[in-house]
Amino acid sequence: MTSYSRQDVLRILDISARQLQGWERAELIPSQQSYTFQDLGQLRMLRILREEDVPAASIRDSIVAMKAVAGMANPLLEARLVRSGTRLAFRHHGAIVDPIRRQLLFDFERGDQASVASEPSPLRRPGANQRDVQDRFLAAVQAEESGDKPRAMELYEEILRIDPAYAPAHINLGTIYFHLRQYGRAEELYRRATIADPGYVLAFFDLGNVLDELQRLDESIAAYCRAVELSPRYGDAHYNLALAYERKGDRRAALRHWQAYIKLDNRGPWADHARGQIRKLLSREKLSIAARNDVYLRPSLDRAQLELV
C-alpha cells in the first residue's frame, strides 16, 4: 500500500503545515505521520470545505452524526457531500441525509439511478417491511416535489399504517398540513414524531413553528429550546428562538440567540437581519464593556464580553 509523509500531503494538496495541524486540533482528522491514498481523499475534501468557509465545528459535528446514523467509518469518503448553508448533508443509498437533524430526503440529482440498498440501514426503523416503507417514502417525496400533494399525502398515510412510528413520514405529512394552514393536524403529526423519535431535531423545530402560528408562544419556545438542546449548532432554531423571545419581550434571551445564529451562519439575508436585530437590541440597552482585547480570546463561562445592565 502506498503511503505518503506529512510533507507529501502538504505538497500534493498545496496546504500549509499550520492548516494540517489546525484540522488535527479541531479533531477533523487524527494526528499521524503517514497517510494512505484514502486519507488524501478525505484531506482533499476537508480543504474544499474549509475554502468554502464551512466551519470546522460544523464539519466535525456532521461527520460524527453521520457515523452514528449510517454506521459509516468515514463519511467523507463513503458518501457524497451536499452543502446546505453552513450545514452538511450526505448522499447515501439514493437519498440525501441531514445527519444532525436526522432528516431523509429523496436525491433527485441521481433520479432513476437511485436504488434502495438491500442491507439494513440504521435510518430505517426495525419491525416492519422497511424496504416497502422506504420505497413509499421516496415516492411520496417525489410526488410532493412534483406538485402532486394529494398523492404524497396518500403515500405518507400508507407508510404510517405500515409503521406508525416512522417519524419522517409524520414530519413530511405534518408539513403539508402546515402549508394548508391546518395547524391542528400539523401539530398532532409533529408531536407524534417527537414521541416516535425523541432525538429527531426537526420534529421539535417544526413543532415550534406550528405552535408559533397557533400563538402559543411559551410552548413554541420550549419546542425550539429542545431542538437547540439536541443540536446546539442548529442555526434555524436559534434564529426562530430569537424572534420568539423578542415577541415575548425577553431582549437578553433574544440577543443571546441572535449572536449564536451569527456564529453559525454569517452570510446572506438572514445573517444581515440578525445583525440588524443585534444592533437594535444593543442600542436599547445600556452596555458596559467587560473586556476588550487586541487579539481574539475564546469566551469562557467566567468572562462575559458584553454585560447588560
Image: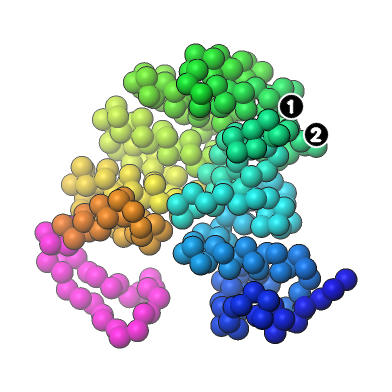
Residue range of the region highlighted in magenta in the rendering: 281-309
Is residue 296 shown in magenta?
yes
Q: Residues within 10 Å of mark 1 (few under 14, many from 20)?
A: some
Q: Position of residue 209 (x, y in %)?
A: 36, 34
Of callouts 1 and 2, the N-terminal one:
2
- Residue 285 point in image, percent of width and height: 13, 62
**Quarter of the figure with residue 167:** top right
The residue tagged 2 is 118
The disc label shown at residue 131, or none = 1
User: From what the image shows, is residue 127 above or below residue 64?
Assistant: above
- Residue 68 — which label? none
User: As shown in the figure, which amino acid type bears the numbered disc 2?
Assistant: Ser
Q: Answer with the quarter of the image where residue 216 lies.
A: top left
Q: Is residue 282 left or right of residue 211?
A: left
Residue 87 lies, in percent from the top left, at 50, 52
Q: Secondary structure at mark 2?
A: loop
Q: Which residue does the image show at 21% across and 54% down from the upper left?
A: 277
Secondary structure found at label 1:
helix
Q: From the top left corner, tell me how far across and down residue 83 is, in percent.
A: 52, 51
Q: Are marks 1 and 2 in contact (CB under 8 Å)?
A: yes
Of 216 and 113, which appears nearest the observer? 113
- Nearest the viewer among 239 and 251 is 239
Magenta region's main secondary structure? loop
Amino acid, disc 1:
Arg
Instruction: Identify the residue at horizontal 61%, vertical 15% (top origin).
Output: 158
Label 1 and label 2: CA atoms lie apart by: 8 Å
Residue drawn 68% across the image and 72% down it: 30
